[in-house]
Amino acid sequence: MTERAAPIDFYFDFISPYGYLAAARIGEIGARYGRPVAWRPFLLGVTVLQVMGIKPLMETPLKSDYLVVDRPRMAKLLGVPLAIPDLDGVNGVAASRAFYWLAERDEDAARALARRLLERLWVEGRDITDPAVVADEAAALGVSRETLEAALGDPRVKDLLRSAVDAAVARKVFGSPFFIVDGQPVWGVDRLWMVEHWLRHGSWERTPDTPL
């Protein structure tokens, strides 16, 4: 039996524009090197606010001004459509719970749901906070709306997300996107090239194709 290639662990928060941009590209990078991608949504509010004790980027002076410039140009460079919605009051809790509940049954469907929710927020500019909205997107994939809505309130499903966030913190994940490949941590959509460099060479030694 052929041993399954180690996955690229892909950590992201649904409300992170950079997480969305990475989601649009990490699959093709993994496929190019025969690596599956394990999608692992988590909550930046826990890692940034509770663990690190710092403000979100858009609430940080100077950094927030930079991001206004950086997000659209990064999207253009990656060839990915991007809207900039109003994120006041928006969170990815229901989306993340739905992902982990669905992943227990069908990982492909869970990834498909994640993509729909990311595109709803970051392409269409529509909120994804309401559990009913998450259920709408899941229903479009053939998932029972009633079953999903019930699951989102289930303490066991809430614990699935809580455990996933705890596991992310234990692996020292602090930003979105964050990748771990063969034990190597890489932070940021602007460092996708580093993920690819590792996959191609298995080391951090500079090579002729290193874009620096």
Image (cartoon, rainbow, N blue to C red):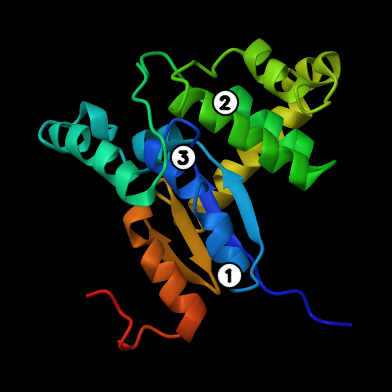
> For the residue labelled by badge 3, is the local secondary structure a helix, a strand or a loop?
helix
Which residue is depicted at the point 29% across and 32% down? Answer: 56
- Of residues 58 and 153, the one drawn nearer to the viewer in this rendering: 58
Earlier sequence position, callout 3 versus callout 1: 3
- Left or right: 20 in relation to 117: left
Q: Residue 106 occupies which quadrant of the picture? A: top right
Label 2 Cα crowd, 10 Å radius (few <14 / some 14-19 / many 20+): many
Task: Give amino acid for label 3.
Answer: Tyr
> What residue is disc 2 on?
93
> For the residue labelled by badge 2, is the local secondary structure a helix, a strand or a loop?
helix
The answer to whether any part of residue 154 appears in the image is: no
Which residue is depicted at the point 20% across and 32% down? Answer: 68
Task: Give amino acid for label 1.
Answer: Arg
Instruction: Point out which mark residue 20 bears.
Output: 3
- Left or right: 18 in relation to 9: left
Q: Position of residue 116 (x, y in %)?
A: 61, 30
Q: Position of residue 166 (x, y in %)?
A: 56, 45
